[in-house]
């Protein structure tokens, strides 16, 4: 049963949007402000409200790490704030100058998408604060968007009713007429769905619209078919246009808010209604689940945000592996890894790790390279944070010795490298081994067999330090056992 535990009534006009990080809740309003609250006691943070927009604020969102907060407005700008101190970091003007209706960070937080009333889509680089790509939907205003958990694509929804799938280079991959009277919101679950019959993994998406409907979709990428959007079912219950929808952390529930003033929580596997909440007195404009706690926020034109608490069947900080010293990390399931991420204040990575099927064994073998190339976490700061937590885990948990990570082995000798160097082919080798390879008049790459453009060898100090840290961890393990 969902229980109303708190009501926020600080905005002086309609609440348009609310968004969670692992520690905060942000809300925005027609009153031109963004307000930020602590999840510990729902008190407003000292720097709140944020005042930078000159017209109504339509949307707000946190970056993956929770360190950045974005907001967008009728004034044609998307503002970037520091969530620690509320400092205004950047003003990103929509290239067309059109009112901005929606904004979203990519999962790796390297890009920020802003969509506008004229149908324009802008993709910003959050590191350079420069425009990376831009485009336009076919018709109507852009009013909704959602990124896939792996960041390889995103979906936009327009007021003419179209759902459009784009890749991370902003190429249009697919377009579907989804809601006759216009899309109002869309969301993609952080948990993929497996198809046991064919072995496919689908991304589950929800969309809602002015036609009073909520539709569930499955997005599939295959080498043969390309992108395929499959209609799954329609969730019923609302008697008026549905303005907002959002998946729970585990993808098992979907919450929706409507002009009928009701909030409905649906079970996605059965399409059944689990809860109907009717405390708002005007249109419900926004709803969001917290990433790793049993909290739900709903906002309304009644100027309030309601906070609800209920039993989410998902791992969170309080349900993490109870005694790490007794449970071998190598035996952790994907859910155990998710629980651990939440306990380490890394809840925003859960969807990304789930999508890539990271279990305990894979967690312990993650490296800077795999975080960059496979999980596509491009931010150096985020990669460093995750790697440090993994190293701490390796030192703390009593488990069987971890196999030597493959990237620590010389491709020539298949032995642990002591003095790694980078050759002109881009691969790292043990210095002595590759020098012997070259001295035997072999000017080809040991890995590709292609000619080496240069015989220069560059010390790989980063890899050498990583190997040293790994050896230190193994030594501490042996001492503890």
Image (cartoon, rainbow, N blue to C red):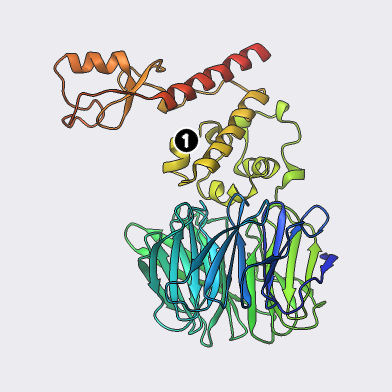
Numbered disc 1: secondary structure: helix
Using a 10 Å C-alpha cutoff, classify the residue at mark 1 as few (fewer than 14 neighbours), some (14 to 19) or many (20 or more). Answer: some
- On screen, residue 438 versus residue 105, left or right, reads left
Above or below residue 331? Residue 469 is above
Q: Quadrant of residue 387?
A: top right
Residue at 81% over, 72% down: 9
Question: Which residue of the protein is positioned furthest toward the left in this rendering?
Answer: 441
Above or below residue 117? Residue 420 is above
- Front residue of 67 and 139: 67
Q: Position of residue 401 (x, y in %)?
A: 57, 20
Above or below residue 125? Residue 18 is below
- On screen, residue 346 versus residue 107, left or right, reads right
- Front residue of 68 and 108: 68
Q: Which residue is mark 1?
A: 368
Q: Position of residue 36 (x, y in %)?
A: 72, 61
Please identify the quadrant where the C terminus is shown: top right
- Front residue of 325 and 385: 385
Please identify the quadrant where the N terminus is shown: bottom right
Residue at 61% over, 34% down: 389
Q: Position of residue 185 (x, y in %)?
A: 58, 74
Q: Quadrant of residue 344?
A: top right
Tally the marks.
1
Residue at 76% over, 57% down: 45
Q: Position of residue 258 (x, y in %)?
A: 69, 80
On the question of residue 481 being in view, the answer is no
């Amino acid at each position: 049963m969902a229980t109303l535990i708190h009501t926020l009534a600080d905005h002086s006009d309609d609440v348009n949007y609310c968004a969670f990080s692992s520690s905060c809740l942000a809300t925005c309003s027609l009153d031109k402000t963004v307000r930020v609250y602590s999840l510990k006691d729902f008190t407003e943070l000292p720097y709140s409200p944020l005042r930078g927009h000159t017209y109504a604020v339509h949307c707000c969102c946190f970056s993956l790490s929770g360190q950045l907060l974005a907001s967008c407005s009728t004034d044609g700008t998307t503002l970037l704030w520091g969530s620690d101190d509320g400092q205004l970091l950047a003003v990103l003007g929509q290239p067309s100058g059109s009112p901005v209706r929606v904004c979203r960070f990519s999962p790796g937080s390297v890009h920020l998408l802003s969509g506008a009333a004229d149908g324009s889509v802008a993709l910003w680089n959050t590191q350079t604060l420069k425009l990376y790509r831009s485009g336009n939907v076919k018709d109507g205003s852009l009013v909704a968007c959602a990124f896939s958990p792996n960041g390889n694509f995103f979906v936009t929804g327009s007021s003419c009713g179209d759902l459009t799938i784009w890749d991370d280079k902003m190429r249009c991959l697919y377009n579907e007429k989804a809601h006759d009277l216009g899309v109002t919101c869309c969301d993609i679950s952080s948990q993929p769905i497996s198809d046991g019959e064919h072995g496919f993994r689908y991304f589950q998406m929800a969309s809602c619209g002015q036609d009073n409907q909520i539709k569930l979709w499955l997005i599939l990428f295959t080498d043969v078919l390309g992108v395929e959007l499959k209609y799954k079912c329609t969730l019923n219950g609302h008697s008026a246009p549905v303005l907002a929808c959002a998946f729970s952390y585990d993808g098992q529930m979907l919450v929706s808010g409507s002009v009928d003033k009701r909030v409905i929580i649906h079970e996605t596997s059965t399409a059944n209604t689990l809860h109907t909440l009717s405390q708002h007195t005007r249109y419900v404009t926004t709803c969001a689940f917290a990433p790793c706690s049993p909290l739900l926020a709903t906002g309304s034109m009644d100027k309030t945000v309601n906070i609800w608490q209920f039993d989410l069947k998902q791992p969170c900080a309080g349900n993490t592996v109870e005694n790490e010293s007794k449970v071998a990390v190598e035996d952790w399931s994907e859910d155990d890894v998710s629980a651990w991420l939440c306990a380490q204040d890394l809840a925003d990575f859960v969807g990304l790790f789930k999508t890539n099927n990271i279990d305990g064994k894979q967690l312990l073998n993650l490296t800077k390279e795999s975080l960059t190339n496979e999980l596509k976490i491009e931010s150096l700061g985020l990669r460093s944070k995750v790697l440090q937590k993994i190293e701490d885990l390796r030192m703390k948990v009593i488990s069987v010795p971890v196999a030597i990570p493959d990237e620590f082995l010389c491709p020539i000798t298949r032995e642990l490298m002591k003095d790694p160097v980078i050759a002109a082919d881009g691969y790292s080798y043990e210095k002595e081994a590759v020098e012997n390879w070259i001295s035997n008049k072999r000017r080809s790459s040991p890995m590709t067999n292609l000619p080496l453009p240069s015989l220069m060898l560059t010390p790989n100090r980063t890899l050498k330090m990583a190997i040293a840290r790994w050896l230190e961890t193994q030594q501490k393990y042996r001492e503890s056992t």
